[in-house]
Each structure stands twice: as C-alpha cells, then as structure tokens.
Amino acid sequence: MATDAAKDVVHCTGEEVRGDFRCAKCDLLIRSPGEADGVLVLPICTLCGSENWRRI
C-alpha cells in the first residue's frame, strides 16, 4: 500500500512506471498495461499537454 508521501510525488513524462496515474493538471487517468512487463512510459497528457503525473 502506498503512503500519502508516495502519492504526493510528481512523476514526469518519460519516466518508466507501473500502476495507475492521473494527470496533475486535468486529472486524466492512465494505467500501466497488465500484460508483458507492465511498464508504462509516461506520455504528455493528450487532453491538456501537461508533463506531470501523480500516482493514485
């Protein structure tokens, strides 16, 4: 289980992550894939163009 401090960390476009993330600006939800290795490279938000993501 993630701590509140871990949830406050902002992740940036290009980072390799696993899990669920929301855009820090518009709240768009993205999830890492369930198949293969499950790694997601954080993209630029397709709705608002932000490069910052927060883990949920």
Image (cartoon, rainbow, N blue to C red):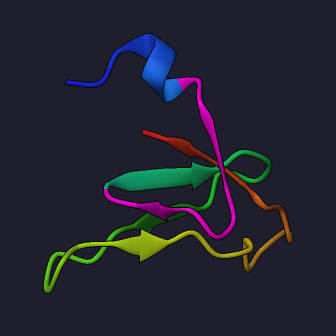
Count of labels shown? 0
Picture coordinates of residue 50, whole percent (x, y): 83, 62
Residue at screen point 18% across, 78% down: 37
Picture coordinates of residue 12, whole percent (x, y): 69, 55
Give whichever of 53, 27 is nearer the camera: 53
In this view, the residue farthest toward the right is: 49
Q: Is residue 32 magenta?
A: no
Q: Note whether 22 is above or below 1 in the view shown.
A: below
Q: Is residue 41 left or right of residue 10?
A: left
Q: Note whether 31 is above or below 36 in the view shown.
A: above
Q: Quadrant of residue 45?
A: bottom right
Residue at screen point 45% across, 23% down: 6
Q: Is residue 12 magenta?
A: yes
Q: Quadrant of the N terminus?
A: top left
Give whichever of 45, 10 is nearer the camera: 10
Q: Quadrant of the C terminus?
A: top left
In this view, the residue farthest toward the left is: 35
Q: Note whether 2 is above or below 49 in the view shown.
A: above
Q: Is residue 4 left or right of residue 52?
A: left
In this view, the residue farthest toward the top is: 4
Give whichever of 3, 48 is nearer the camera: 3
Residue at screen point 13% across, 83% down: 35
Picture coordinates of residue 48, whole percent (x, y): 85, 68
Residue at screen point 80% across, 48% down: 25
Q: Quadrant of residue 13?
A: bottom right
Q: Quadrant of residue 2?
A: top left
Picture coordinates of residue 32, whole percent (x, y): 33, 69
Where are the magenta residues, as a range?
8-18
